[in-house]
Image (tube, rainbow, N blue to C red):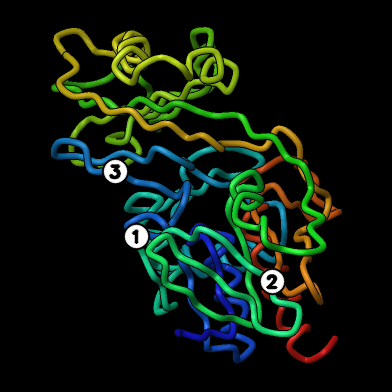
Amino acid sequence: METKEVIIIGGGLSGIMTARTLMKKGVEDILIVEKSRIVGGRLATRRIGDGKADHGAQFFTVRSRELQEEVEKWLEAGWVKRWFGSPYPRYTSTDGMNSLAKQLAGTIPVKLNTRVSSIRDGRDGPLEVELETGEKILTRHCVVTAPVPQALQLLTGTSRLRAPSISFAPCFVGMFTFDGASRIPSPGHLDEELPDGVERVVDHYKKSISSTVTVSVYMTGDWSKRNERLEDDDILGEIQKVAENYLERGSAVTGAQLKRWKYAEAETVVRTPFVEMGEEGRIILCGDAFLRENDEAGRTRFESAYLSGISAGKRLAEKRKGI
């Protein structure tokens, strides 16, 4: 049976930053377990036709000195660029948001395409992380970065369960290829004066991450809730009507794909960057819904996920020292 000192469930930004923080503090026996085929979570980029499209986070802003110092390094390395916006610049990856996640994950050990079915907290022994394959991994500490509703499903065998109650709004994203130009003005992002139910529209060719015109249309949480029982084709058909509004004369939609984000944004947040639970607090929950007390924005976003992961990593490093 495999044994790890730390298992991190979820390879999104919080999980990656937890691992990076621990490794900086000398903790090497780490494993991220990720259900998808790539790391990144909502730092998601998809090939569509001959182009590509971001269909999760489109950009991020910076309010903390901690993240700003890192962003300066990313700018110098060419990982990100200033896209638009003032007084808070919108930063985006130069090659799609998922490429930033992969660069941050670096050499962190990751087990992809792997689902966790449960976490059992043995009072006198190690934590037992069971995979859907039936395989079990023993660990001293476990960090769970999955959205709280999903995390609670894994923790039914855990004592002293004090997880916060957080509800999430879904988001449906339509991705479309055009055979000509779009009417979306440079730099390729719209979030004002949009049709009812539409949150944002993005042209990835004008964003400079796609060699062909690809457009993402994000629907609001309310719209997505109202329509979540519809079949994918029906949802995509409604979103395509929006995309067609942004066709330049002579252009047409040539391809369409749908992404359903079930846990797109927390409707409530927790004013602490992580929560400890289980015997001796060996299980830590963190993620973008876990905000530091001094968080000015007060909502889930790239930066909240980033800082939550760092805070969880620091706390776990303290626990190893008995603090």
What is the number of the mark on residue 113? 1
Which element is circle 3 on? Answer: strand
Compared with 258, 108 (above or below) is below
Earlier in the chain: of badge 1 and badge 3, it is 3
Q: Label 3 sits on what residue type?
A: Arg
Query: Which numbered dot is residue 121?
Result: 2
Q: Where is residue 82 in the image (x, y as percent from the top left)?
A: 48, 49
The quarter of the picture where residue 282 lies is bottom right
Quadrant assignment for the N terminus: bottom left
Observer-nearest residue: 48 or 209? 48
Q: Mark 3 sits on what residue?
A: 46
Left or right: 287 with respect to 224?
A: right
Above or below 312: residue 275 = above
Label 1 vs label 2: CA separation?
24 Å
Residue 256, given in percent of the width and then of the height, sits at: 24, 24
Residue located 59% across and 79% down the image: 6
Q: Which amino acid does label 2 sit on?
A: Asp
Q: Is residue 196 left or right of residue 252?
A: right
